[in-house]
Image (spheres, grey):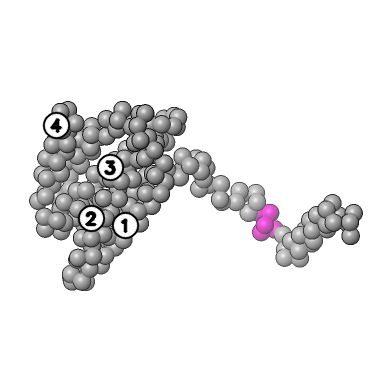
């Protein structure tokens, strides 16, 4: 009964967006309603087959990450050229993006409730995913009802939030220094710049000889 009332409230909020522009107040209401519907998921998943759904999150999450920017790019291309060449494809992509966002969000919510991720990064990741899903569905509803401006703005905002969501998801899986760790330290940059090609070749030659001496010379 309670779940039915939450679903009805969620549909009411989404249907309200059919002819309305994107506004912070409406986005906030939709996110709050969607979050209320998600609150029951950990309880339903505990000790049931739904607990396995969390394992699907790493696979499903790639679909909205790809489909949202692609739908936005085609939508903007039509607007710039004042044509409707990609209109039908954009509708299909927006539908697929919204559906895949929901399919990625639910297993992700289950997984976050099963593992001990602490707080901070995981909270930002979860709530930015909720915002992304809400915006994706709002964009789909707007486009379906002929509100082209609402679809474009919804896709644009969802594309921004999906980048934020993906960034914090990477921090969870690869560590909080996943981005900075790929960049050379300042002292390493200075060292690389100072060494000439001849010096670098000499250093590599010494390292190679050391490897051969420790592993090959005793048998060969």
Please tell me which residue lies in front, 66 or 44: 44
Identified at 56% across, 50% down, the residue is: 182
Please identify the dominant SS of the magenta region: helix
Residue numbers of the magenta segment: 190-194
Image location (x, y in percent) of residue 130: 29, 40
Instruction: List the residue tagged with mark 2.
Output: 95
Disc marking residue 131:
3
Image location (x, y in percent) of residue 35: 25, 34
**In the displayed structure, would residue 214 be above or below residue 38?**
below
Instruction: List the residue tagged with mark 4.
Output: 5
Identified at 48% across, 42% down, the residue is: 173
Identified at 17% across, 36% down, the residue is: 7
Image location (x, y in percent) of residue 26: 16, 41
* Residue 19 in view, yes or no: yes
Instruction: List the residue tagged with mark 1.
Output: 67
Look at the image and tell me in which quarter the N terminus lies: top left
Residue 167 shown left or right of residue 6 in the figure: right
Q: CA distance from mark 1 to mark 3?
A: 16 Å
Neighbours of disc 2 within 10 Å: few (<14), some (14-19), many (20+): many
SS at badge 2: helix
Q: CA distance from mark 1 to mark 4?
A: 31 Å
């Amino acid at each position: 009964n309670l779940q039915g009332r939450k679903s009805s409230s969620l549909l009411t909020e989404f249907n309200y967006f059919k002819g309305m522009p994107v506004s912070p107040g409406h986005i906030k209401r939709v996110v709050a309603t969607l979050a209320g519907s998600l609150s029951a998921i950990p309880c339903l998943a505990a000790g049931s087959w739904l607990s396995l759904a969390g394992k699907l999150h790493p696979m499903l999450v790639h679909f909205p990450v790809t489909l949202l920017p692609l739908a936005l790019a085609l939508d903007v291309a039509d607007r710039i050229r004042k044509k409707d060449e990609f209109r039908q494809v954009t509708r299909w992509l927006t539908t697929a993006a919204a559906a895949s966002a929901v399919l990625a969000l639910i297993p992700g919510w289950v997984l976050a409730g099963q593992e001990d991720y602490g707080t901070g990064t995981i909270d930002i990741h979860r709530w930015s995913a909720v915002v992304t899903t809400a915006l994706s569905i709002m964009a789909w509803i707007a486009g379906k009802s002929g509100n082209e401006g609402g679809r474009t703005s919804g896709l644009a905002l969802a594309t921004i939030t999906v980048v934020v969501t993906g960034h914090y998801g990477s921090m969870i899986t690869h560590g909080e220094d996943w981005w900075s760790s790929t960049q050379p330290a300042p002292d390493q940059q200075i060292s690389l710049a100072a060494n000439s090609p001849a010096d670098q070749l000499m250093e590599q030659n010494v390292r190679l000889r050391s490897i051969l001496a420790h592993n090959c010379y005793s048998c060969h």
